[in-house]
Image (tube, rainbow, N blue to C red):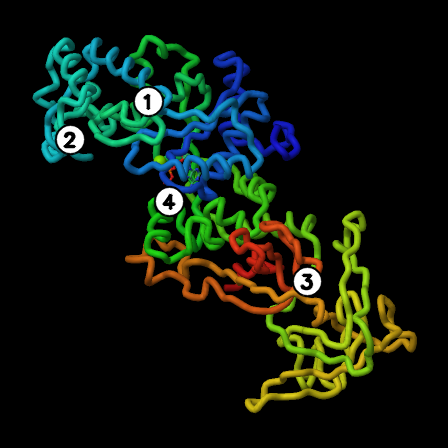
Amino acid sequence: MSQHNKTDAVERPVNFIRNIINDDLANHKYERVQTRFPPEPNGYLHIGHAKSICLNFGLAEDYQGFCNLRFDDTNPSKEDLEYVEAIQKDVAWLGFEWHGEPKYSSNYFDQFYAYAVELIEKGLAYVCFLNAEEARAYRGSLTEPGKDSPYRNTSPEENLALFTKMKQGEFKEGECVLRAKIDMASSFMCLRDPALYRIRFEHHHQTGDVWCIYPMYDFAHCLSDAIEGVTHSLCTLEFQDNRRLYDWVLAHLNDFNRPDRPHQYEFSRLNLEYTVMSKRKLHQLVDDHLVSGWDDPRMPTISGLRRRGYTPASLRDFAERIGISKVDSMTGMDILEAAVRDDLNKVAPRSMAVLDPVKVVIENFEGEPLSIQAPVHPQNEAMGKREIFFGRELYIDRADFLEEAPNGKYQRLALNKEVRLRNAFIVKGERVDKDAEGNVTTIYCTYDPETLGKKPADGRKVKGVIHFVEASKALPAVFRIYDRLFTVENPVKADNFESVINTESLVVKQGFVEPGLDNSDPEKAYQFEREGYFCRDNQSGNIQVYNRTVPLRDTWSKK
Ligand code: ATP
Ligand code: MG
């Protein structure tokens, strides 16, 4: 079963699809619930897909039904095994288990062919030799009806012979297509005798060179659902009109003209601010080298978010928070980040990392570094302790020191001012060394040995806590600080990506982490105190590279 806890159906927010399912079960339209997630293997999955995955697999779980993972692989020229594998990995990582083996529309190519033959025999499909340009002219427009193709009234016998020839490779690519005979005057363009099969001399990643005709997506999609016994076929709103075609196809086939055939319901897609979501656009980012690949941590792909430190729980929670409706809208990044922050705040071990180091020498400390036990999580004792060190040489963040403390609420280190080092002692700034340009190179301090985990005995007040690492034990590390990929809310509206890409979406820093992170697992998030949530990069091997998942506080609302 999936790794996350089952949630009772009643606990989840009601949405229109749940209402439909509840009615269908009450009216015995179906006695079970079966859904599917049907990606085309032509790219990596993005967070929009995660919404659809959570919906389909979530419903199947809640209603004790099942959900197939099915690749709608009808377009071999755009598809690749790399995507088939990546998609399976992403769905499993999200914590969902598909029913049985992964399914492929290409598993049903023989059946599709037989159903096409049935339509031809019923006089409901014909082979059409109009070229692409003619076909477009015949189709008409939104304001004008189309015209019947001159091939529309060919007899079923003749069409059968022509379709057989198509299958046998006796026509050239583009020479003819099989079309459904529906209604050239329909106000739904997709019902104006849509193509069902086309010729493509392409190698297919599942069926090899067996076929030179391939079903169109619309024909294959509704048939795959019907063959698998899907009850509720859920998809995004842009398929609203296509539903009429799906219903027409199933209503005209003997196997599927029954009330318990699949019914389609549409919901609105997820759109996220400051990024793009369609696979075509994501392809473009990768191909134009605007990102390092599909799993670049700035990408809204599931693999990018995973590499960035997002957890499966946070993405499922996000899907829950945005809900399901028919209203088109733009979702703010703050909602996505709040979901991961809420999860990581509970589960991420605490640690200290210095991203912009400046050296500190504790003049009154001598000898070997001192080992200190610090809590892994301040609110969760069960997570145990970790070993950190304090010694003569430390690093703190450059931003945590000023020679002269400004008046008022300054709570960091300054000369003649005390501050607490997190999990360790109170220290006081004494003097500094500087380089020729006047930059501070070393801060000399003294420490109060009586203040480890204790307030000063004399009752003096020390405000402010800063983080640090002990220099001889700390591990050098690279930090990648990510920001929004685009400078505008809706980049799709821009003329080109180059003009709206955020050139500062990745800033690299060199610093240090605690020695305990030596064997930190890739993708496992830590809270680096005061700096944000970070995880070890999953592509950098033994080098200590940390990707910032999110800052500790929301930065979207004020930008
Ligand atoms: P894209 O437009 O990104 O290329 P697609 O719809 O072509 O996506 P498919 O592989 O066909 O991608 O999608 C599989 C399923 O995921 C479909 O049922 C589709 O409706 C759903 N889906 C795709 N994008 C989103 C989104 N942004 N929000 C919610 N569901 C989505
Ligand atoms: Mg698609």
Q: Report which residue position mark 3 lands on.
A: 529
- Which mark is nearer the camera, 1 or 3? 3
Circle 1 or circle 4, nearest the eye: 4
Does residue 416 appear to the left or right of 306 in the view shown?
right
Q: Earlier in the sequence, mark 1 or mark 3?
A: 1
Is residue 126 placed above or below 551 in the rendered structure? above
Q: Which mark is residue 174?
A: 2
Of labels 1 and 4, earlier in sequence is 1
Within 8 Å of ligand 1, the CB of disc 4? yes
Chain-order first, disc 2 or disc 4? 2
The foreground one among 498 and 263 is 498
Query: What residue is at 70 percent from the left and 72 percent from the top?
Result: 471
Q: Amino acid at mark 1?
A: Tyr
User: Looking at the image, in which quadrant does ligand 2 appear?
Assistant: top left
Q: CA distance from mark 4 to mark 3?
A: 36 Å
Q: Earlier in the sequence, mark 4 or mark 3?
A: 4
Q: Which residue is mark 1?
A: 246
Location of residue 468 in the rendering, given as x and y in whole percent from the top left corner: 70, 70
Q: Quadrant of residue 256?
A: top left
Q: CA distance from mark 1 to mark 3?
A: 54 Å
Q: Quadrant of residue 402?
A: bottom right
Q: Nearer the viewer, mark 4 or mark 3?
A: 3
Residue tagged 4: 278
Query: Which numbered mark, 2 or 3, is in the foreground of this view?
Result: 2
Point out the tag, 2 or 1, that comes first from the N-terminus.
Answer: 2
Q: Position of residue 538 (x, y in %)?
A: 54, 51
User: 482 or 9, which is in the foreground?
Assistant: 482
Amino acid residing under circle 2? Gly
Tell me the amino acid under the disc marked 4. Answer: Ser
Seen in the image, is 197 located left or right of residue 369?
A: left
- Mark 2 vs mark 4: give the one in front: 2
Callout 2–callout 3 Cβ contact below 8 Å = no
